[in-house]
Image (spheres, rainbow, N blue to C red):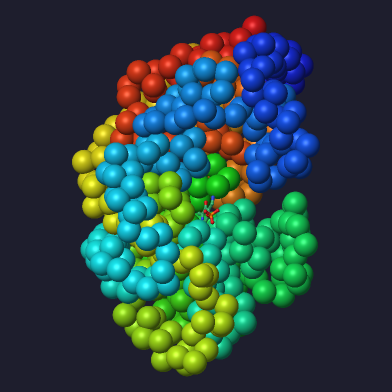
Amino acid sequence: MTGVDPARVAALHAEATRRFEAQRPRSRELFERGRRVMPGGVPMSWMVKWPGSWPTFVARASGAHFTCVDGIDHVDLCLGDTGAMTGHSPAATVAAVRAQLDRGITTMLPGEDAVVAAEDLAARFGLPQWQFTLTATDANRHLVRYARHVTGRPRVAVIDWCYHGSVDETFATLDADGRVVARRGNIGPPVPPEVTTAVVPFNDLDAMERALAPGDVACVLLEPAMTNIGIVLPDDGYLAALRDMCDRTGTLLYVDETHTLCAGPGGCTRAWGLRPDAVVVGKTIGGGVPAAAFGMTAELADRVQRSVELEDVDVGGVGGTLAGNALSMAAVRATLTEVLTPEAFATMTARAVRWTEGVQAGIDAAGLPWQVTRLGCRAEYTFRPTPPHDGAEAAAADDFALQQLLHLWALVDGILLTPFHNMALMSPDTTDDDVDRHSRSFATVTQRLLA
Ligand code: PMP
């Protein structure tokens, strides 16, 4: 299906592994040492999933590049899986954070930065009321709780093959018979996900209609374009029809823009004129400093406020002691007002167009049945000839061994792709040269796949 011979993939993987191991002895030392005190030698379990015989340990990162402890310069097309979409350590964010470090890191009280950050987000997304958390996971989790609380409905609807962080209700997929099941790898689900969750294929309005018909779904939570199983773009009119359906059935519509902020300064919400009841943003809004936010319509914010007693506001399942801390808020204010500007998005998007063309040229030169999909400053190739229409199609096109090879090949050529899929993200600091370095490496490995 991918058009390549698995034996060829294995042979090239072995070649790249030899290069990797020769290049990175110092990373190996840290890995061996780290293994004695951390499972897998890494501070968080998913970091073992990088390609290579051991993780690459980073010495420093700046702009669109990082240098590993073996002194190898890398073009970073992963950018902390969006956490560093601003480029690493953007000057304005660093200056604001440095200044704040001397003025107090966390107090549980608000400051002016929070007001400015919320004003900026309100102007970008057209939603007037904002709250801040440390992670996008928390922002999604809080909104889901609010949805159940204000509607009195028990369930949520999500998209098949979605990802919204470690939110229990969202770890569900459809099996071959269309039944809701725990997603493969779901660790310790609290209850069977079909109890809490309706799962609907992306771009399928009939299935959504059926899911919302019983009237027990509090909210639909979705990315306006899927970005966590390849990029899957919405059909024309899909999101508008979904809005109408939510209005008709009294269901809240939540748009998770954590990744799709790549579409422009106000994400897809602004770019496509969406009218969600709430929006989630995270990761990059603090320039890499932990911070996320959710914005609500005045109506939803009012329903929430009226439904929560002052006496209970601290222990209701929404919060986090460090949420909205002064350091995060200083980072968010500076990042929004000085880094993630409309000009920055124009530059980033131009680089992504170049990356898309470069990779597609490599695919075409090798005659492979693959394609590239782009959304703003993010692009991704899939091992299928046409863009996927839903998550299941995208998942079916996946090939773990081939993906590991392409990631490892890039890595030994000094290029980091986003792990777990074939995605590249552009920062304001990414240059044409950085993009072309990847296109050359990709052209080489795809030619050799056929040799
Ligand atoms: N929403 C989306 C769309 C995401 O892709 C992710 C993480 N990849 C999250 C939420 C969760 O972000 P975090 O892990 O920072 O909580």
Quadrant of the image occupied by residue 292: bottom left
Q: Give the residue drawn at x 47%, y 19%.
A: 73
Residue 320 versus residue 400 in the image, above or below? below
At which x and y percent is residue 92? 27, 44
Residue 262 versus residue 179 in the image, above or below? above
Residue 398 versus residue 75 in the image, above or below? below
Q: Give the residue drawn at x 54%, y 42%.
A: 230
Q: Is residue 345 visible?
A: no
Question: Viewer-proximal residue, 201 or 10?
Answer: 10
Question: Viewer-proximal residue, 176 or 253?
Answer: 253
Task: Report the quarter where the N terminus lies.
Answer: top right
Quadrant of the image occupied by residue 20: top right
Residue 354 versus residue 20 in the image, above or below? below
Quadrant of the image occupied by residue 4: top right
Q: Give the residue drawn at x 74%, y 56%.
A: 186
Q: Is 352 positioned to the left or the right of 222 in the image? A: left
At which x and y percent is residue 274? 34, 63
Q: Give the residue drawn at x 47%, y 29%.
A: 60
Q: Is residue 113 visible?
A: yes
At which x and y percent is residue 173? 68, 58
The residue furthest left is 343
